[in-house]
Amino acid sequence: MTSVNLRWTTQLSAADHADMAELFDSEYAQEWGPWNPKQGYGYANGELHGMARSNGKLLGYASTARRFIGVGEREVVIAGTGGVITSAESRGMGVGRQILAALQEASRSFAPADFGLLGCRDEVVPFYRSCGFTRIDTLIRDISPRDAMTVVQSQGPTMICAGTRPVEAWPVGVIDLRGLPW
């Protein structure tokens, strides 16, 4: 049986970090090198971590971190979602969906944010749609994870979901993450 636990960064154990390193390295070590909890491949770190386990084995992971961002002339609080990964043998079994559902519920309750937001590749847009995310077409400005200094602007794909506010309340305009993406 798969269980999903949510933990704040301060609640992560050394064993959690070791399990996360094993999971991330299985997918990304060849391109990005060994996973380091201090750097997270250059992306913004999470504050709330969702971990799916079965019989003690980490099957999947994702995290969120809240941040004020600019959208057009408005300011909103988002739960930036990143680090979404499931082990190769667990894909297609609903593990990622369970983790994202738990993180979305947290953004409506004990870790409140107006909306959830993530950036992704075109080929995984259908997965995120099945998890309650909606694609929006707008420019997004952030800091490049490659050097953590260069401001970049891109077209997405960008996905949002309801937090404490419905998706229909998302403001119009360019998104400024005001920092690294997740």
Image: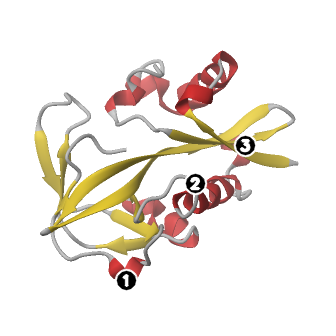
Residue at which label 2 appears: 110
Kindly state the secondary structure of the residue where label 2 is placed. Answer: loop
Q: Position of residue 90 (x, y in %)?
A: 72, 47
In this rendering, the answer to whether 136 lies above or below 112 is below
Tell me, yes or no, if residue 80 can be seen here: yes
Amino acid, disc 2: Phe
Query: Quadrant location of the C terminus?
Result: top left
Q: Is residue 21 left or right of residue 33?
A: right
Amino acid type at image mark 1: Glu
Q: Find residue 168 and name its label.
A: 1
Between marks 1 and 2, how big is the CA–CA gap?
Answer: 22 Å
The image's mark for residue 89 is: 3
Label 1 vs label 2, nearer the camera: 2
Which element is circle 1 on?
helix
| Mark earlier in primary sequence (2, 3) | 3
Between marks 3 and 1 in the image, the one whose residue lies nearer the viewer = 1
Q: Nearer the viewer, residue 131 or 79?
A: 79
**Amino acid type, callout 3:** Glu
Is 20 placed above or below 83 here?
A: above
In this picture, residue 85 sits left or right of residue 142: right
